Amino acid sequence: MARTWCTMPRVKRCTLYITLVSILHQSSRFFDRTYLPLNIIWNGEPVEVCTFDYSDWVQYVGVDLYFTIYFLFRVLFVHLIPCILLVTFNILLFAAMRKAQERRKLLFKENRKRECKKLRETNCTTLMLIVVVTAFLVVEIPLAVVTAMHIVVSLKKFTMDYSVINVLIIFTNFFVVVSYPLNFGIYCGMSRQFRECFKEIFLGRIAVNKDQMSKYSIVNGPRTCTATNETVL
């Protein structure tokens, strides 16, 4: 099933569709406000500043209805549904990893080392995915809750000090930013293939030359210079 659905063309199409829907979802924010000049008195002198008002089409639809639809779409399709799917996939991944561990023990008893090693690499990749998805959920679930609270308070369905929500939004955004280097550390620490790919992309020829020198040293051994008695690699 995974080989049928998780193919590269399907992944590219899904990525394109998600990108287009995301652009359409955010595109209204470019046109929902109009900015107007405003003359005020500042320190006894007239100063021209800028103020904003909602666009005519937003006022026609209704400001409350517009932002309710906007944030409900965000809660459902950006936070809630992806989190539910990721929790489900995480459970399935964990169950698959447990089965793979039992199979690895069986292969180890039968002394089938090659298949055992291949299964171990698959388990490492599965464990890395579980850790990354869990870190994502720890960040995204509180963000979904805070966004839902923002909608409820904005609709005046629930009375709450808005300064508390502002503090929660600041903390959730902070944890979102922290999760990016955390994910990078997880990939670097748990995936040898990621480390090699990162080294090849960003270090380029430096890493390649270093690897070639190391391989040459392993094959030919160290050479000792008789003039200075220094080992040359």
Image: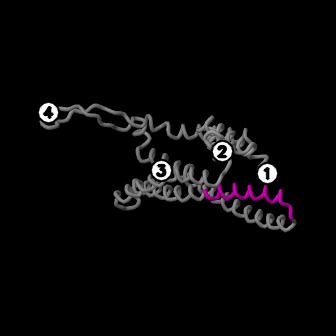
Q: Which mark is residue 194?
A: none
Q: Which mark is residue 196?
A: 2
Q: Would you call the spot at circle 3 few (<14 residues within 10 Å), some (14-19), or many (20 or more)?
A: few
N-term-proximal mark, 2 vs 1? 1
Assign the C terminus to one quadrant of the image: top right
Q: Amino acid at mark 4?
A: Glu
Q: Is residue 129 magenta?
A: yes
Residue at image point 69% right, 54% down: 125
Q: Position of residue 34 (x, y in %)?
A: 36, 34
Disc number lying in front (4 or 2): 2
Q: Would you call the spot at circle 2 few (<14 residues within 10 Å), some (14-19), or many (20 or more)?
A: few
Element at badge 4? strand
Residue at image point 78% right, 67% down: 102
Q: Amino acid at mark 3?
A: Val
N-term-proximal mark, 4 vs 1? 1
N-term-proximal mark, 4 vs 2? 4
The residue labelled by disc 4 is: 45
Q: Would you call the spot at circle 1 few (<14 residues within 10 Å), some (14-19), or many (20 or more)?
A: few
On the image, which quarter does residue 153 sit in? bottom left
Q: Is residue 210 magenta?
A: no
* Residue bounds of the magenta highlight: 111-131
The residue labelled by disc 3 is: 177
Q: CA distance from mark 4 to mark 2?
A: 63 Å
Determine whether label 3 and label 4 are within 8 Å by CB.
no
